[in-house]
Amino acid sequence: MTVMPRPTAVLHSLVVALLICFFLPVPATAADDQAVYTLQADGLACPFCAYGIEKQLNRTEGVDSVETDIKTGTVVITMTPGATLNETDAKRAVEAAGFTMREFKKKDSGG
Amino acid sequence: MRLRHPAIALAFLAALAFVSQTRAAPQTFNTALPIAEDEFVLREQFIYRNATDDPSLADRRLRVLGGVSVLGYGVTSDLAVFGVLPYLDKELDLITPGGQRVTRDTSGFADARLFGRYTVFKDDAQGRTFRIAPFLGLELPTGDDNDRDSLGRLPAPLQLGSGSWDAFGGIVLTYQTLDYQVDAQAIYKLNTEANNFEFGDEARLDASLQYRVLPRELESGVPGFLYAVLEGNLLYTEKNEMNGVTDPNSGGTAFFLSPGIQYVTKRWIIEGIVQLPISQNLNGAALEDDFTVRVGFRLNF
């Protein structure tokens, strides 16, 4: 004899599964269709200043996220799917924050 | 000239010398570090100042409590403008010539300051920057300069405002690395007359050292930095004039040394410092400072 699960039990399991998915940390990796760029921000030497660069870059159209590594002065910019970033816009954002962009390159693959 | 708190000053200098790893913005003056274009920085500083070292028979005791709000805005990455608005509560306790001890006090908004700072030189490299920025501003007579109590009009130094429009200008230099920061500033303030009273002009030299003590080794990302801070302020003030007559019991030279601490993150800073008079060579019976405590925060938004 086959025992069928009660509908309420199924619903309960679904809610629990959805909650688990919602609260699980999402890996901060870009999807294949998200371009990722790195740049070197010279002059960056304290946490308070890093916020200025991140905010200026985040204002640039198509930017999804910005992550800074203060030790190396490296800034990683992940674009929204299909968007690209040109060097002129990146340089303008860094300079608007008061710093100097030394290097700009696109990562070979997103993710 | 008297030396005060020399042991504390020496102990702090010695402690800094043993901070092996390292060394953020000064707390008693400005920095040449940039404010990003079209961005604001808010700073709030709470002050407690005590001055009771009175060489006169009046046995004056001055206590100033206050808060100073500073809003900075980046017009461009090189040009920043600042507005400074202090709120002060001043209380002066003294013995009158008749031998009676009285307390005179006032509170409210003091004179506001507006100034602009422009970066004329910038040398950036990986993990370090050097900047030079002159600044120019005006102190506006926004504070009450005619406050009275039962004894009459409060003396000019106790008023919240000077009543005068006073220009000031100077230059600030900053050298910052991931490990430490050095700032230096020279400033001159030209005081003008109001209500037949003119405060003496002021000149000051300031210096600040900030050493990163935590984290000792930098991790990836943008961790919060804890800095040990030591600042020095050399202040020269000319004598005041009342009705065209120089007040011999005003003005002079004072040197303050200030140990402090500062915690810096991307969005906010919390900080505290104690200004200690190391040397006060003041004219006549001018009232000498005991200490000033400053605690505050800054917000990037």
Image: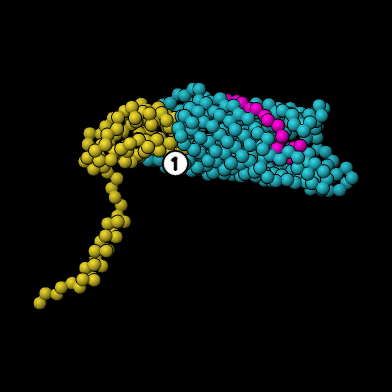
Chain colours: A yellow, B cyan
Q: Position of residue A31 (x, y in %)?
A: 23, 43
User: Which residue shows up at 42% across the image and 42% down it?
Assistant: B223
| B246 to the left or right of B25 | right
Quadrant holding the C terminus of chain A = top left
In the image shown, does B259 or B223 lie closer to the viewer?
Answer: B223
User: Which residue shows up at 89% across the image and 45% down it?
Assistant: B98
Give, as a single range, the part of the protein colored magenta: B156-177
Q: Quadrant of residue A62?
A: top left
Q: Is residue B185 above or below residue B88?
A: above
Residue hosting label 1: B266
Q: Amino acid at mark 1?
A: Lys
User: Which residue shows up at 26% across the image and 60% down it?
Assistant: A18
In the image shown, does B167 or B46 lie closer to the viewer?
Answer: B167
Q: Position of residue A4 (x, y in %)?
A: 15, 73
Bin the neighbour count of mark 1 within 10 Å (Cα to Cα): few under 14, some 14-19, many 20 and up: some
Quadrant holding the N terminus of chain A = bottom left
Q: Secondary structure at mark 1?
A: loop
Chain name for mark 1: B
B170 within the magenta span: yes
Q: Position of residue B295 (x, y in %)?
A: 59, 44
Residue B294 visible at all: no
Find the residue positioned furthest to the left.
Answer: A1
